[in-house]
Image: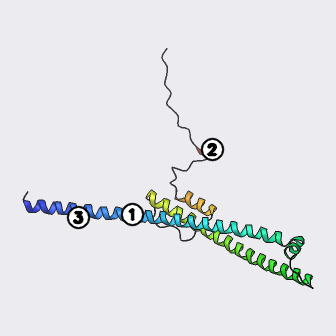
Amino acid sequence: MNCACMKKLILAALLLLVCFGEAASVRAQETSSAQQSVEALRSQLRDIEAKQGELEARMRQVDEDLRPENIEKSLALTGSTRPEELRAQRRQQLEKEKASLQAQLDQLATSRTRTQAALAAAETASYQQSAGGATNAPSQPQTNAAAAASSQQNTPRSVQPQPRKNRKRARRPRVKRRS
């Protein structure tokens, strides 16, 4: 071979190596971005749970403050000619706060459900990418029954266990013993 052919062959080999290297780095970046997405969603879920815990603790405190004897204790040092109005005003204030806390808790519960669904979808996508499977994750999370049904449909028939009554037992050929 002449020198020009050798140079072209080496150049082609280097070009292929560069292309495969870039493809591998893109794949690694996709996997790491999916893992980063999973970690971000987990962090968001932890934040939601922490906020929910704080709100529940405050709700318990407001419930305790709403007891009639505690309302009277909170207003004990306040002098007034109309203590009934002050107690009613304090009760209304606490009930408004309780309603606001309940609305926030309901909103957090909805947010938590959505985040859990998004986390499940992101974990599935991350697993599929790391396993070399399909790179497209479902756009909407599936329910457990739907996910199980679709995973059984996608599983090759040979991998799924057959019902016991339909299995045929492989028979070994009989060997005559010599005595």
The image's mark for residue 15 is 3
Label 3: which secondary element: helix
Neighbours of disc 1 within 10 Å: few (<14), some (14-19), many (20+)? some
Image side of residue 164 versus residue 154, left or right: right
Name the residue type under label 3.
Leu
Image side of residue 61 versus residue 17, left or right: right
Label 2: which secondary element: helix
Q: Earlier in the sequence, mark 3 or mark 2?
A: 3
Q: Is residue 82 visible?
A: yes
Q: Which residue is mark 1?
A: 27
**Which quadrant holds residue 129?**
bottom left
Name the residue type under label 2.
Lys
What coloring was used for the rendering? rainbow
Distance from the alpha carbon under mark 1 to that under mark 3: 18 Å
The image position of residue 45, as x and y in percent, is 60, 66
Q: Quadrant of the N terminus?
A: bottom left
**Which quadrant holds residue 69?**
bottom right
Q: Residue at x 8, y 60 (%)?
A: 3
> Residue farthest to the left?
2
The image's mark for residue 165 is 2
Image side of residue 10 versus residue 16, left or right: left
Q: Earlier in the sequence, mark 1 or mark 3?
A: 3
The image's mark for residue 71 is none
Q: Residue at x 62, y 44 (%)?
A: 164
